[in-house]
Image: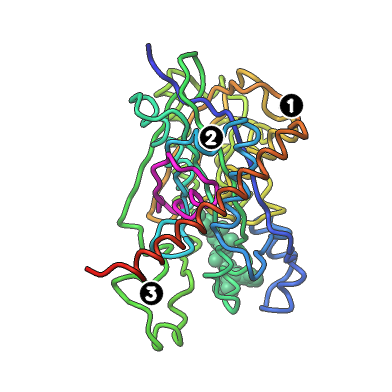
Amino acid sequence: MTVQAHIVGWGKYIPERVLTNDDLTHMVDTSDEWIRTRTGIVERHIVAEDESTATMAIEAAHEALEIATLRPTDLNLIIVATATPDHLFPATACLVQDALGATQAACFDLAAGCSGFVYGVGLAADLISTGNYVNALVIGAETLTRITDWDDRATCVLFGDGAGAVILQANGSDGGVLSSVLGADGSGGDLLYLPAGGSRQPASHQTVSEGLHYLKMKGREVFRFAVRAMPAATRLVLEKAGLTVEDLSLIIPHQANYRITDASAKALGISKDKVFSNVDRYGNTSAASIPIALCEAVEQDRIHRDDLVVFVGFGAGLTWAAAAVRWSAPLPTAPLTRRKKIWYALSYRYAALRSLVRRFVRWLVARFTRE
Ligand SMILES: CC(C)(COP(=O)(O)OP(=O)(O)OC[C@H]1O[C@@H](n2cnc3c(N)ncnc32)[C@H](O)[C@@H]1OP(=O)(O)O)[C@@H](O)C(=O)NCCC(=O)NCCS
């Protein structure tokens, strides 16, 4: 029996604070008109001081678990796709695991830029098909505004923060993730990158004073790459699944710029209403953009059972990725009962307590044992 990976849970977290185009006009030499016409962005959300990639990822994971009605201990795998992890190590996925109490899960972060979430879905589906994993949580989460140069008008108007998650589950029935394609061209690495803070240029007074901890981008070249990569990856993933563009119900593309998604729709010969867009309200949230858009597509009744949905992304690396999914989860989802809500709240409290006890025991062992 072949095992397919089905999406059984999804969730998102959007930080509260909104930064509008008008707000940006007080920070750099730009205009609402320029940003809207060149990108389609009207506003974006920005993390609060006490929030981070992990805290947003955890909130998105809560929603996904509750929709899937799974216990955190049912998860065997957690992948966090991000370019803005809380730390270089430990992996943000481990922070998520600890907060959820997902004690049976293998955890790692995935760095594939804005394609990261789709890379995660493709990898998790392949791992599930081996029979070694049953429930995989794939999260895209970013705090891009923490690596944004707020004096650089060419980039600071583009990005926002947020997180989205899905749970993929092994199932013998047809549907779920039908195919995926993951690609990269490292020769374009310098088109979108963060110069300092890694082993090539470790943090120093000089790197900080030169602003090398902010992302740098050659926008026009990334644009040219994106309008080629998105339709090509979409066609390829459909071909791999034995399907064509005519079979498509909805494309959920990486939300970077409405001109890129419009050009992709044109290249594929499909109408714009088959391409989901919410870039106007969130800007580019990198690896988080596709799962956030997926959640909104579900909320807006744009996805139904048996629909063929394609996720397609492009980003730093350069990377690109697409996944074709036959939607199998029943919609609308049943609201959580009061009892279930209490159960989840208690289980997260228990996870926090467990973490505290384990830290305390480690402290005790270190204090009272000698080599
Ligand atoms: C960034 C992007 C919106 C710029 O649009 P563009 O049409 O290519 O604009 P250009 O970079 O050619 O700049 C055009 C002019 O606008 C100016 N400009 C740039 N940012 C501006 C801003 N925020 N406000 C006003 N003017 C701006 C430039 O200085 C330039 O002026 P010049 O002609 O006098 O030199 C577009 O290239 C893009 O979306 N690229 C892809 C980026 C992306 O998706 N990145 C994430 C990948 S995951």
Disc 1 to disc 3, C-alpha distance: 47 Å
Q: Amino acid at mark 2?
A: Ile
- The answer to whether residue 231 is above or below residue 30 is above
What percent of the width, then of the height, locates residue 54?
54, 57
Q: Residue furthest top?
A: 1
Quarter of the picture containing the C terminus is bottom left
Q: Which mark is residue 334?
A: 1
Q: Which mark is residue 196?
A: 3
**Counting residues from the N terminus, which is met first, the one under dot 2 or under dot 1?**
2
- The answer to whether residue 280 is above or below residue 244 is below
Disc 2 to disc 3, C-alpha distance: 34 Å
Asked if the stretch drawn in magenta spans residue 101, the answer is yes
Q: Which residue is mark 2?
A: 167
Q: Point out the frontmost of discs 2 and 3.
A: 2
What percent of the width, then of the height, locates residue 353?
56, 54
Residue at 60% x, 73% y is 153
Disc 2 to disc 1, C-alpha distance: 17 Å
What percent of the width, then of the height, locates residue 130?
33, 25
**Counting residues from the N terminus, which is met first, the one under dot 2 or under dot 3?**
2
